[in-house]
């Protein structure tokens, strides 16, 4: 193998694929990155057997070939090289990769590429296309609600469901739920896959990889492998699916609310951040006081209050349009901040039916995203 690439392209590719490598891999070769030539491109690939990432960069290929080398060593080395052309030359007899760039040289000992686990081939003919920017936003609006612990594996994943021309993503951790839908440009029809649970980590990595150049993300399910694959312009991500049945999330979404608040998103977010300073000393519990207007000439008010037994307290009032009854409810303020951070619309709706009822947060003028947050107990506070 004799290949030339740009340092910045190789560094970016290594940054992407290295995220599929565990700090303590089960097999020595899984600490390596696979380098292989393909037409006028260089492919880099890494896997931990649950998540695999491939990335392609443009290259001048004088002689084809493949090798695996320690990913961390190559990444650290490339990061020190100048932004110039890197020449890669493999000695197949000793499995040593020689690098030269800007007068600097290095030799990295590798392992045979034939020993590296094979990543499945992507079946573009049976793939389902989703607009790249939309899919990236969908992931960001649900993935934070997935459970961080693996006590219930299905809750550490995100449910993906295709129904006709609608794609739904849903995530829940027992305390909050995020559901985001989008209409596709076509009906999936006969190729409609079964609902699948994708590890949240996979979607987090995919969200990072999706760029402005990715107008479409193609989604494919290899037959009988319990895997899902995502094809982008320059990358391919393959992941094991999580087995199990996702909870009936629709059953916990309130169908009506006694108090409905319409408020500027940034105003409510700023109020939550001020109160979090003190609320984090009280298990992140903050009180939300909702008071409708007393007359037609004055707006209603939402007050976010955080309190610490040792440090003090803060109250942040926000003007709002309010329908219904006065109410006081306590939420995990961190959860409220998380959802407000992913709502990009100017105004947001906050709905509740009382101190013990779930709260609902959603964009004011869109019906494709809804977030449910369970109230906190304030007994003894």
Image: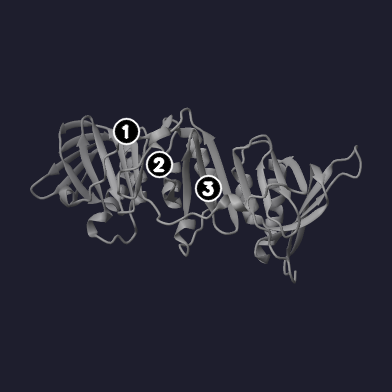
Which residue: 68% across, 66% down?
A: 282
- Left or right of residue 17, residue 347 in this image: right
Cα separation between marks 1 and 2: 15 Å
Q: Is residue 44 left or right of residue 338?
A: left
Say if residue 33 shows up in the picture.
yes
Query: Mark 2 and mark 3: span between their CA atoms?
Result: 16 Å
Mark seen at residue 170: 3
Which residue ends up furthest to the left in the rendered image?
Answer: 93
First reached walking from the N terminus: tag 2 or tag 3: 3
Residue 344, how many percent across, how many down? 61, 38
Quarter holding the C terminus is bottom right
- In this rendered view, identify the residue nearer to me: 227 or 108: 227
233 to the left or right of 326:
left
Ranked by sequence position, the earlier of labels 1 and 2 is: 1
Mark drawn on residue 124: 1
Query: Of helix, strand and loop, which one carries label 3?
Result: strand
x, y percentage for residue 67? 18, 46
Of marks 2 and 3, the one in the foreground:
2
Question: Seen from this angle, which residue lies furthest front?
Answer: 190
Where residue 11 appears, as percent x and y from the top left, is 33, 41
Residue 215 in percent (x, y) is at 43, 29
Nearest the viewer among 72 and 375 is: 375
Visible residue check, residue 77: no
Q: Relative to 101, does residue 282 appear above or below in the rendering?
A: below
Number of the label disc, if any, that sits on residue 193: 2
């Amino acid at each position: 193998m004799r290949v030339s690439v740009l340092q910045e392209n190789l560094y970016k590719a290594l940054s992407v694929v290295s995220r599929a490598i565990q700090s303590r891999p089960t097999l020595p070769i899984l600490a390596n990155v696979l380098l292989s030539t393909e037409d006028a491109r260089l492919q880099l690939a890494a896997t931990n057997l649950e998540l695999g990432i491939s990335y392609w960069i443009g290259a001048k290929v004088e002689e084809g070939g493949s090798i695996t080398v320690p990913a961390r060593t190559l990444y650290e080395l490339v990061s020190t090289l100048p932004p110039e052309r890197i020449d890669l030359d493999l000695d197949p007899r000793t499995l040593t990769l020689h690098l030269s760039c800007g007068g600097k040289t290095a030799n990295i000992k590798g392992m045979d590429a034939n020993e590296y686990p094979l990543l499945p081939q992507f079946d573009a003919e049976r793939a389902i296309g989703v607009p790249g920017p939309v899919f990236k936003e969908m992931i960001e609006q649900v993935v934070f609600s997935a459970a961080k612990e693996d006590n219930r594996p299905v809750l550490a994943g995100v449910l993906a469901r295709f129904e006709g021309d609608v794609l739904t993503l849903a995530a829940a951790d027992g305390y909050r739920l995020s559901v985001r839908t989008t209409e596709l440009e076509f009906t999936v029809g006969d190729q409609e896959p079964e609902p699948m649970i994708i590890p949240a980590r996979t979607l987090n990595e995919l969200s990072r990889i999706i760029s402005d150049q990715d107008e479409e993300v193609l989604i494919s399910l290899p037959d009988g492998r319990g895997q899902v694959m995502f094809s982008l312009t320059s990358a391919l991500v393959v992941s094991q699916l999580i087995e199990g049945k996702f909870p009936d999330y629709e059953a916990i979404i309130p169908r009506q609310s006694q108090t409905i608040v319409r408020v500027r998103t940034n105003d409510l977010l700023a109020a939550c951040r001020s109160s979090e300073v003190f609320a984090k000393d009280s298990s992140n519990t903050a009180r939300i006081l909702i008071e409708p207007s007393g007359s037609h000439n004055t707006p209603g008010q939402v007050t976010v209050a955080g309190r610490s037994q040792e440090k003090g307290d803060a109250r942040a009032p926000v003007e709002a349009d309010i329908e219904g009854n006065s109410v006081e409810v306590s939420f995990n303020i961190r959860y409220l901040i998380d959802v407000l951070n992913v709502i990009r619309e100017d105004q947001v709706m906050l709905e509740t039916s009382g101190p013990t009822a779930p709260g609902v947060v959603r964009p004011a003028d869109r019906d494709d995203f809804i977030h449910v947050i369970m109230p906190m107990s304030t007994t003894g506070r």
